[in-house]
Each structure stands twice: as C-alpha cells, then as structure tokens.
C-alpha cells in the first residue's frame, strides 16, 4: 500500500512538473513576442528580455533534467541572473554557464 501511494504521488508530481515545463514554454513565447513589440526608442531603462529568456531556459532545463535524470542527483551550478531592468549602457548578455567539473 505504501509503495502504491508513493507511485501515485510520483506520477502526480511528474504530471505537475510536465505542466510547469508547458507553462515555461508559454512564458518564453510571450517574452519573445513582448521583446518584438517593445518600443525601439532608446529609453534609459528597459526590460532585459534576453536575460529573462535565458533564465526561463535554465529553469526549464532543470525541470526536464529532473524528469529525465542523466545522473543520480540534479545539480544547479549557476544561480539565476534575476534583475531584469537594465540601463541603455549595459549590453544584453545572458548569464553564462559554469564549466562542468
């Protein structure tokens, strides 16, 4: 009985995480559209869509790695970039991945 409960809990978790990846895909498409429609004038501050999309991809990859593990434990070597407001002087560069050990 306990094993059956664990299996159903695991199935429910996997289903929810699959829904999370679907929502992340949707967010990425919305961010792509928003970036395409963002005002082209050079405001002092604007939203950093490149950084947002890089973070969304990083989260999506982490969830997928958990759902289909390639090793015993998922790892998280690089923190999310965060801070999606940038000034005009700052170049748009996504967060860099840490080298693999």
Image: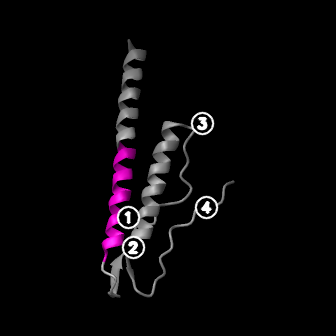
Q: Which secondary structure lies at badge 2?
A: loop
Which label's residue is closer to the chain start, 4 or 3? 3
Are the residues flagged by discs 4 and 2 in contact, CB closer than 8 Å? Answer: no
Q: Which secondary structure lies at badge 1?
A: helix
Give the distance between the C-alpha atoms of the residues marked 3 and 1, in whole angstroms.
34 Å
Give the distance between the C-alpha atoms of the residues marked 4 and 1, in whole angstroms.
25 Å
The residue lying toward the viewer, choosing from 63 and 22, is: 22
Are the residues flagged by discs 4 and 3 in contact, CB closer than 8 Å? Answer: no
Q: Main secondary structure of the magenta part?
A: helix
Q: Which residues are magenta?
A: 20-38
The residue lying toward the viewer, choosing from 25 and 98, is: 25
Q: Which residue does the numbered mark 1 point to in the structure image?
A: 32
- Could you tell me which residue is drawn at 40 percent across and 33 percent down? 14
Which of pointers 4 and 2 indicates the residue nearer the eye?
Answer: 2
Which label's residue is closer to the chain start, 4 or 1? 1
- Could you tell me which residue is drawn at 34 percent across and 79 percent down? 46
Disc assigned to residue 72: 3
Where is the N terminus found, in terms of image quarters?
top left
Q: Residue furthest top?
A: 1
Give the distance between the C-alpha atoms of the residues marked 3 and 2, in whole angstroms.
35 Å
- Dot 2, crowdedness within 10 Å: few (<14), some or many (≥20)? many
Q: Which residue does the numbered mark 2 point to in the structure image?
A: 48
Which of pointers 1 and 2 indicates the residue nearer the eye?
Answer: 1
Q: Position of residue 53 (x, y in %)?
A: 42, 62
Which of pointers 3 and 1 indicates the residue nearer the eye?
Answer: 1
Give the distance between the C-alpha atoms of the residues marked 4 and 3, in whole angstroms.
20 Å
- Dot 3, crowdedness within 10 Å: few (<14), some or many (≥20)? few
Which of pointers 3 and 2 indicates the residue nearer the eye?
Answer: 2
Q: Position of residue 5 (x, y in %)?
A: 37, 19
Q: Which residue does the numbered mark 4 point to in the structure image?
A: 98
- Could you tell me which residue is drawn at 53 percent across and 37 percent down? 68
Which label's residue is closer to the chain start, 3 or 2? 2
């Amino acid at each position: 009985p306990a094993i059956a409960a664990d299996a159903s809990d695991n199935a429910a978790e996997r289903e929810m995480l699959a829904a999370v990846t679907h929502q992340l895909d949707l967010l990425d498409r919305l961010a792509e559209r928003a970036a395409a429609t963002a005002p082209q004038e050079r405001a002092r501050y604007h939203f950093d869509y490149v950084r947002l999309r890089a973070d969304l991809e990083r989260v999506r990859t982490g969830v997928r790695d958990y759902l289909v593990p390639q090793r015993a434990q998922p790892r998280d070597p690089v923190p999310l970039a965060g801070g999606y407001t940038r000034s005009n002087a700052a170049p748009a560069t996504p967060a860099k991945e840490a080298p693999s050990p």
